[in-house]
Image (cartoon, helix red, strand yellow):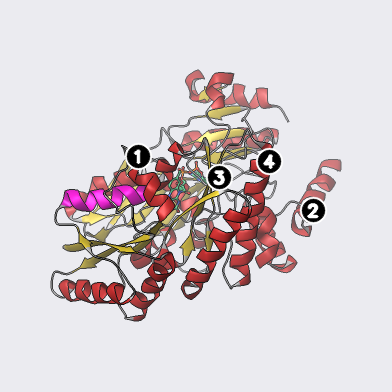
Amino acid sequence: MSFDAVIAEIRSKLGAEAVLTADAELLVYECDAVTMHRHTPMAVVLPNSTEEVAVAVRACHEQGVPYVPRGAGTGLSGGAVPVEDALLIETSRMRRVLEIDFENRFAIVEAGIVNVDVSKACASGGLHYAPDPSSQTVCTVGGNVAENSGGPHCLKYGATTNHILAVRVVMPDGEVVDLGRADQWTTGYDLRGAFVGSEGTLGIATEITVRLVPTPPAIRTLLFPFPELDASCEAVGAIIRSGIVPAALEILDRNTIEAVEASPTFRAGYPTDAAAVLLVELDGLEAGIEDQVDSVTTICRQHGALEVHRAQTAQERAALWRGRKGAFGAMGRLAPDLFVQDVVVPRTRLPEIIREVVEIGARHGLHVSNVFHAGDGNLHPNITYDRRDADQVERVRRAGKEIIVRCVAVGGTLSGEHGIGLDKAEYMTLVFTEDDLESMAKLREVFNPRALCNPGKILPSGGGCFDRQASRLATEDAQ
Ligand SMILES: Cc1cc2nc3c(=O)[nH]c(=O)nc-3n(C[C@H](O)[C@H](O)[C@H](O)COP(=O)(O)OP(=O)(O)OC[C@H]3O[C@@H](n4cnc5c(N)ncnc54)[C@H](O)[C@@H]3O)c2cc1C
């Protein structure tokens, strides 16, 4: 394996400025948004096109050098961080909109485009790209595809996989393939489906065909303060039971409200005396939407909501969302580091699990804030801490694990949207058998037989599945 040969080959084909190797330049790539996991890459490659990605991948393939795809580095499971000496292939120079087909409602974009720029590009045609992670002003569509990202509006519209029609992929041997079709009528195995959510372990997405949906003519945004966190969770269950499908149902607890309201950047006007606020957005046709507002208001009042704030203008709606979407950012004022847990439970178990999360945080002496996609049962306990304090780091890890174990015990799972990456690979055995993991390893081997593309992610390293691949590779090397 020769990194120097790979770098020389890429520089000769893509130009010297396409590869970063200086220590100061590499430092910013040492982690993603999980600052706990760090590993500085050997070099960063900045390709401009599918062909340039293929040049870099082929060079790695020929020399047996591992590499990691990277978008904006906002991931919350350590997926874009190398676990060993590796190259990063970063898509930030690939952010063009290649085509918008308003009639057939799709757009073809490069993988490095920032999520929100897709909706901006097609707004004139009354369409938008629905998946809206709270990081949408920064994160890339390529990263969203890799993580099968969610977002507040995915309650009604579905997560990223429901909006990806086709993906152009540079395979780990450098071949370029197209998975899926813009008209969605794929026959045979759904390889597009296998690729979405594969966390950069099956290849590098370079061009993505996204579904566009009509921007709803009527939108109502409501905020309900509650005196108890439990009651806000119960109101969420009752709203869904009533048959209404809001576009979004988001809860912020008191610690989150305090962090948001203390932030000059993200302040939203949330009441600081509430134990929780429930942010509800309803959308659709003008006809009938006021009936839904009345029903939701009645349900929330029955569950103890203290009052209702209704956004009267686009600015007021933006302010209510600013607090929710900026909540993780607002926590940056509380401590140097933030650990965002991402777990899912059946919606009916939300009240008890939230109580347990608060208890686990208190038992470990940690500051935990909860802000979550309540309609999906997708929790985000946020633990603020200082990674320079080894004891605190250990307590954060233990609390994170206890939260996962409890969520799995009530029928939940490891991640709703942030993926497994590096951070949760060791927990895969909590929800999957050895056979399940073996099947996943086999799928990965079909795409990525030499495990050069983002090694060490998703599958637990101690499991038989990994050992099998490692021993096969060792045998091949010996021959
Ligand atoms: C403040 C904040 C709020 C967030 N809110 C949400 C939210 O509401 N919902 C949500 O789901 N997530 C959220 N996230 C997590 C994160 O933004 C998403 O996971 C996002 O999709 C990552 O995109 P990225 O471009 O930053 O990818 P990166 O972090 O660079 O990479 C993430 C993974 O994707 C792989 N990858 C990146 N690009 C490609 C590519 N072109 N081809 C193949 N693999 C690739 C990487 O190898 C890595 O495994 C949030 C993060 C932050 C910091």
Give the x, y percent position of residue 310.
19, 61
- Label 1 sits on a secondary structure element that is loop
Of callouts 2 and 1, the N-terminal one: 1
Of callouts 1 and 3, the N-terminal one: 3
Give the x, y percent position of residue 311.
19, 57
The image quarter containing residue 127 is bottom left
* Residue 134 visible in this rendered orientation of the protein: no
Q: What is the chief secondary structure element of the magenta stretch?
A: helix
Give the x, y percent position of residue 160.
42, 58
Query: Which quadrant: the C terminus?
Result: top right
Of callouts 2 and 3, the N-terminal one: 3
Is residue 90 rendered to the left or right of residue 421? Answer: left
**Amino acid at the residue labelled 2:** Asp
Of callouts 4 and 3, the N-terminal one: 3
Q: Residues within 10 Å of mark 2 (few under 14, many from 20)?
A: few
**Amino acid at the residue labelled 4:** Asp
- Label 4 sits on a secondary structure element that is helix
Q: Residues within 10 Å of mark 4 (few under 14, many from 20)?
A: few
Q: Nearer the viewer, mark 1 or mark 3?
A: 1
Q: Start and end of the magenta stretch?
A: 314-325
Q: Nearer the viewer, residue 302 or 40?
A: 302
Q: Nearer the viewer, mark 4 or mark 2?
A: 4
Give the CA distance from mark 1 to mark 3.
48 Å
Give the x, y percent position of residue 280.
29, 64
Residue labelled with disc 4: 391
Residue labelled with disc 3: 175
